[in-house]
């Protein structure tokens, strides 16, 4: 793939527009002072022709989800209270940021959004269920509110900010709650909407996370999907860079919530970052890297509260191969053991994969032995039906509350010492599904969720001791002597 990217790189560069994408996550727009910082950051980058993508204000998507559940259960009081709180918070922030005339105009627009929100909740209550389609119709409204406020504030600050409806530009399939863009149509629409604005010196502002089907039915790109929106926009424009502004200094050696001494990783390759995101590093949505990688667009993860910090640069090559760059943990995993009634024949393997796919169950990891298969899944709802379908061929057993701990770094597979040191550090913790070698750049194992944080802390302490430089090197004398190229 890297060779492919190399080959594409000059062509990609030639077509490149001279704009950048700046995506601000929920905490970067959580209150009036955060939004003031956003305006300042956009101002500083005016000459780079920014397109602004914003998430809902921090926690709003969760609150909308809770309101949707309450509506489906007919709990009217909870719904009314939730809507009231959302209304107050958005209006208060707008009032704090804008003077009378601009505030009145925005308040009207927000009122329209709140009416649509009421209607969405009423229809969930009438149906008595919170279907994936209804979820998308409701949850994306947080971004509609936040993008209106951010546009109004940029405008007030003298910037020619223009609000665009992302639902009109990002066209997706109908896989509600985890939609995928229809790339050709999306690229065309984004270019048609954005390029004229950028040429005339305007700053387009879009809500992240949302799209719609060709028929105009609202969809979402999955939780945390505003990062993906930014990458979709960046790829359509062949932007010079995509900036993901968040509440930490960049991609860190692990989640700072687990290890307060986690440190910024200055550089990652696209592959390393994709692997980190896939294995649970919430700082990036897992789908973000693919569009960037396809067009070789550098992605920067930056801290909106500490804009002097250099952040993390994600590009095709990162250097520092053979080193663990970061440790992640993916929680709420179930391990499913498939025991064949007779033996593990290739047909059974195929059938198992087919049945899981029919039930839209993504398999996270799979390990096979003659005695059976072990699979990882993130939800167990479909497992009884899957077990029924496989009856006579195989028996299914599953266990919840597992977590996958994963170490990521280019070519760490070539450093056998890493595995031995890692497993020594967690030797008293029961580990399963140890997976090394399927990918050059990751080593993962399964633990009980209750032991996940402690395992990460021990590994972090081992690999990133506090007094040393951010990336740990496992000195492999054997490999050095063999003259293998590694740094
Ligand atoms: P945003 O609202 O900006 O999209 P998120 O909450 O989605 O931000 O992601 C940022 C959070 O990701 C951080 O506050 C941090 O707790 C968490 N996180 C998990 N793993 C990592 C990591 N390896 N590096 C940085 N942050 C991480
Ligand atoms: N607001 C959405 C969420 O909380 C999308 C995002 O923030 O990226 O999942
Ligand atoms: Mg996020």
Image: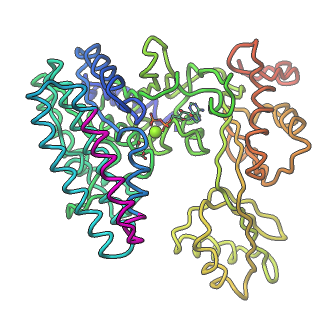
The picture places residue 39, in percent across and down from the top left corner, at 27, 21
Q: Is residue 337 depicted above or below 240 in this figure?
A: below
Number of marks in the rendered image: 0
Is 224 in front, or is 435?
224
Residue beneath the point at 81% across and 65% down: 369
What's the colour scheme? rainbow
Q: Is residue 76 depicted above or below 386 in this figure?
A: above
Is 72 in front, or is 460?
72
The picture places residue 249, in percent across and down from the top left corner, at 52, 21
- In magenta, the rendered stretch is 69-92
Quick one: quadrant of the C terminus? top right
Q: Is residue 398 visible?
A: yes
Q: Is residue 128 depicted above or below 482 in this figure?
A: below
Using the rendered view, name the quadrant where residue 302 is placed: top left
The picture places residue 361, in percent across and down from the top left corner, at 56, 66
Using the rendered view, name the quadrant where residue 165 is placed: top left
Asked whether 199 falls inside the magenta stretch, the response is no
Is 442 in front, or is 397?
397
Asked whether 71 falls inside the magenta stretch, the response is yes
Residue beneath the point at 76% across and 23% down: 484
Asked whether, in this view, residue 355 is left or right of residue 147, the answer is right
Using the rendered view, name the quadrant where residue 468 is placed: top right
The picture places residue 407, in percent across and down from the top left corner, at 70, 37
Q: Is residue 289 visible?
A: no
Q: Magenta part mainly helix, strand or loop?
A: helix
Residue beneath the point at 76% across and 33% down: 457
Asked whether, in this view, residue 247 is left or right of residue 112, the answer is right
């Amino acid at each position: 793939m890297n060779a492919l990217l190399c080959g594409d790189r000059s062509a990609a560069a030639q077509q490149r527009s001279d704009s950048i994408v700046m995506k601000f996550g929920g905490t970067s727009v959580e209150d009036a002072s955060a939004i003031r910082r956003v305006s300042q950051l956009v101002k500083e980058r005016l000459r780079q022709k920014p397109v602004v993508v914003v998430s809902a204000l921090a926690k709003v998507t969760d609150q909308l989800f809770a309101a949707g559940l309450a509506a489906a259960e007919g709990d009217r009081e909870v719904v009314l209270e939730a809507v009231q709180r959302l209304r107050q918070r958005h209006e208060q922030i707008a009032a704090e940021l804008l003077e009378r005339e601009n505030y009145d105009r925005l308040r009207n627009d927000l009122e329209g959004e709140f009416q649509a929100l009421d209607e969405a909740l009423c229809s969930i209550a009438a149906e008595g269920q919170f279907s994936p389609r209804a979820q998308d119709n409701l949850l994306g409204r947080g971004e509609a509110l936040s993008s209106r406020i951010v546009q109004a504030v940029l405008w007030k600050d003298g910037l020619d900010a223009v609000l665009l409806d992302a639902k009109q530009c990002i066209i997706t399939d109908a896989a509600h709650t985890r939609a995928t863009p229809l790339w050709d149509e999306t690229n065309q629409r984004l270019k048609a909407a954005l390029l004229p604005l950028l040429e005339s010196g305007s700053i387009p502002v879009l809500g992240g996370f949302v799209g719609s089907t060709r028929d105009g039915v609202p969809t979402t790109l999955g939780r945390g999907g505003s990062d993906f929106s930014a990458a979709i926009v960046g790829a359509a424009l062949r932007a010079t860079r995509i900036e993901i502004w968040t509440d930490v200094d960049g991609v860190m050696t692990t989640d700072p919530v687990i290890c307060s001494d986690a440190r910024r990783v200055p550089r990652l390759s696209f592959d390393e970052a994709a692997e980190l995101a896939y294995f649970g590093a919430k700082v990036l949505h897992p789908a973000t890297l693919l569009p960037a990688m396809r067009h070789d667009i550098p992605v920067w993860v930056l801290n909106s509260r500490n804009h002097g910090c250099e952040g993390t640069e994600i590009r095709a090559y990162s250097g520092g191969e053979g080193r663990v760059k970061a440790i992640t943990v993916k929680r709420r995993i179930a391990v499913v053991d498939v025991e064949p009634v007779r033996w593990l024949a290739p047909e059974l393997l195929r059938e198992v994969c087919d049945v899981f796919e029919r039930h839209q169950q993504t398999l996270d990891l799979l390990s096979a032995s003659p005695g059976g298969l072990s699979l990882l899944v993130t939800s167990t709802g479909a497992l009884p039906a899957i077990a029924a379908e496989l009856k006579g061929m195989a028996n299914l057993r599953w266990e919840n509350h597992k977590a996958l701990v994963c170490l990521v770094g280019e070519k760490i597979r070539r450093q056998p010492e890493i595995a031995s040191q890692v497993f020594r550090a967690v030797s008293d913790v029961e580990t399963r599904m140890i997976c090394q070698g399927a990918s050059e750049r990751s080593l993962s194992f399964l633990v009980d969720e209750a032991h996940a944080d402690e395992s990460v802390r021990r590994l972090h302490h081992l690999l990133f001791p506090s007094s040393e430089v951010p990336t740990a090197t496992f000195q492999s004398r054997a490999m050095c002597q063999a003259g293998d190229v590694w740094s």
